[in-house]
Image (cartoon, rainbow, N blue to C red):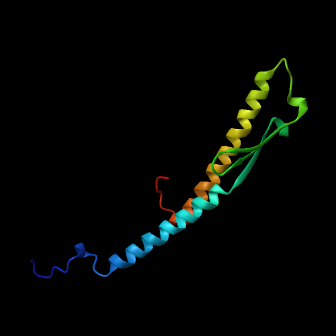
Amino acid sequence: MAKGFKGGFGMGGNMGALMQQAQKMQRDIEAAKAEIDQLEIDATAGGGVVKMVISGTHEIKSLTIDPSAVDPDDVEMLQDLIIAAYNEAARKLAEVSAEKMSKATGGAKLPF
């Protein structure tokens, strides 16, 4: 064995602290994911004629359509408003999720 080799690839006593830090981060990430799953995000489109609420798991929880948005001669407009409301809710959810995960990871960019 080489003179001065203490094992642990030069990490010495820091390995235990590193493992504890990784375990804490894992617990924090799991807690953040659970919190995100419980979120309800709302969004509107068309000046509020279409309102949607989605969960943290991207499930549509509610959809409200003002009767004024229903035009049998322009179904495409209503379809576009529903899509726009969902996309806005999904964007908000992604933003909130990224913020919560950033707090859980101490700002480290990890793939989730």
| Residue at position x 88%, y 35% in the image | 66
Residue farthest toward the top in the current orientation of the protein: 73
Q: Quadrant of the N terminus?
A: bottom left
Q: Nearer the viewer, residue 91 or 19?
A: 19
Place of residue 54 in the rendered image (x, y in percent of width and height, measured from the top left): 71, 46
Place of residue 25 in the rendered image (x, y in percent of width and height, measured from the top left): 48, 68
Q: Is residue 20 left or right of residue 7?
A: right
Place of residue 19 in the rendered image (x, y in percent of width and height, measured from the top left): 38, 73
Q: Is residue 103 left or right of residue 64?
A: left
| Residue at position x 58%, y 59% in the image | 33
Q: Is residue 27 left or right of residue 22?
A: right
Q: Is residue 65 above or below residue 34?
A: above
- Residue 23: image quadrant is bottom left
| Residue at position x 16%, y 79% in the image | 5
Place of residue 76 in the rendered image (x, y in percent of width and height, measured from the top left): 76, 22
Q: Is residue 58 above or below residue 15?
A: above
| Residue at position x 68%, y 39% in the image | 87
Q: How many marks?
A: 0
